[in-house]
Amino acid sequence: MNLDALTYAGNPENLSDVDLKYSGSKYRFVHGDITDSELISSVMEKHDIDLIIHLAAESHVDRSIHGPADFIRTNIFGTFVLLEAARKYWKNRTDVLFHHVSTDEVYGSLNESGLFTETSPYNPRSPYSATKAGSDHLVSAYFHTYQLPITISNCSNNYGPYQFPEKLIPLMILNMINSKPLPVYGDGLNIRDWVHVDDHNEGIWRIVTNGTIGSTYNLGGGNERTNIDLVKILCTEYSQINRQEKEELLSLIRFIEDRPGHDRRYAIDSTKLKSELGWKHSIDFQEGIRNTINWYLSHLDWVEQVKSGEYQNWIEKNYSGRM
Ligand code: TDX
């Protein structure tokens, strides 16, 4: 059961292969909003839901800076609606699970050394991360107060196919395809830890099948890069795949005004997930990046489709000339 509000970043096409394979039997799609409590309660009841994997969120930091309201509504209020529906429908059942998918950004920003662990204090610094921190706290509170069976995962930056082209990696790939400038915020030395979306999914699956109730698991790529290094890697890989001069691509790099409150470094210690649940990466970074570039090159129709409409209007209003 896939419930999605299909906002600017959602697209039913993303799961068309699953739909084709399982529609009517194992897979159903419901077009709906997690803030709609009547809808959520009726879906819970009608389909006797016993596991919720909650990934529904407004997720883009830049958007949260321009307009935090949707983030508060979906990420905090929406999480509350889901938790209430689960609490009321499941009553005191223990054979059920509410898993909340969250982010490393709740822990704030690191200096050059150190890693976030599950016990790092929360210190969110953008409207986006503040709403994810708020929703994590709510989920945790439902465990302690109502004994709702929950787990939480806090993951580092994802990359891979179907990522909406507002995020760094697809944005850079698409700008290379269109010979547009590659906008790097500030000095380009902010560090992110990258993990392939398939490795993230594998981690979530391990947690929902074998995780300890009430626990948080950190999930990171063990793969830290400064933004400028990452953009250069993308230029190198893209130039080889598309037989284009690397220098030509590098010359598109532009250092532009920094993101307000830009967190300097995120890095995650995944020891707990590895030792308790046997999770490990299966996708090598260079191979993952190459596959991602190839995926975007062969899905330009999809890109056009997701970029038409509301997203395009927003970009023109807030970022004209940048992308
Ligand atoms: O044009 C850009 N130029 C640039 O330098 C963009 C879009 C980003 N950046 C920088 C900002 C960040 O340091 O690249 C880094 C990555 O930026 P994003 O792709 O916007 O991701 P980030 O802000 O790190 O957050 C992402 O990872 C954690 C997701 O958007 C979050 O939802 C997730 O929780």
Image: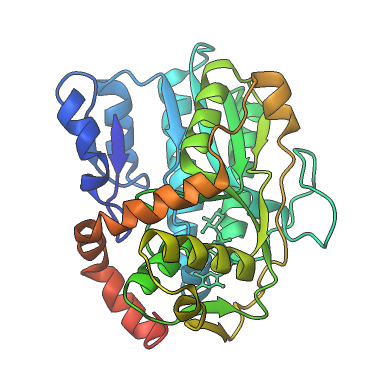
Q: Ligand 1 lies in which image quarter?
A: bottom right
Q: Is residue 235 above or below residue 58?
A: below
Q: Is residue 166 visible?
A: no
Residue 41 spot, x, y in % from top left: 33, 31
Residue 47 spot, x, y in % from top left: 27, 21
Residue situated in front as seen by the camera: 276 or 233 = 233
Task: Judge left or right: residue 185 versus residue 294.
Answer: right
Q: Quadrant of the C terminus?
A: bottom left
Q: Quadrant of the N terminus?
A: top left
- Please identify the quarter of the rendering in which residue 195 is found: top right
Residue situated in front as seen by the camera: 61 or 322 = 322
Q: Which colour assignment does the render follow?
A: rainbow
Residue at 55% x, 30% y is: 203
Residue at 66% x, 72% y is: 262
Q: Is residue 111 above or below residue 104?
A: below
Residue situated in front as seen by the camera: 289 or 255 = 289
Task: Judge left or right: residue 223 versus residue 303.
Answer: right
Q: Is residue 118 above or below residue 73?
A: above
Residue 128 spot, x, y in % from top left: 55, 61
Residue situated in front as seen by the camera: 32 or 212 = 212
Residue 174 spot, x, y in % from top left: 36, 68
What count of labels does the image hold? 0
Q: Is residue 244 visible?
A: yes
Q: Residue furthest right?
A: 113
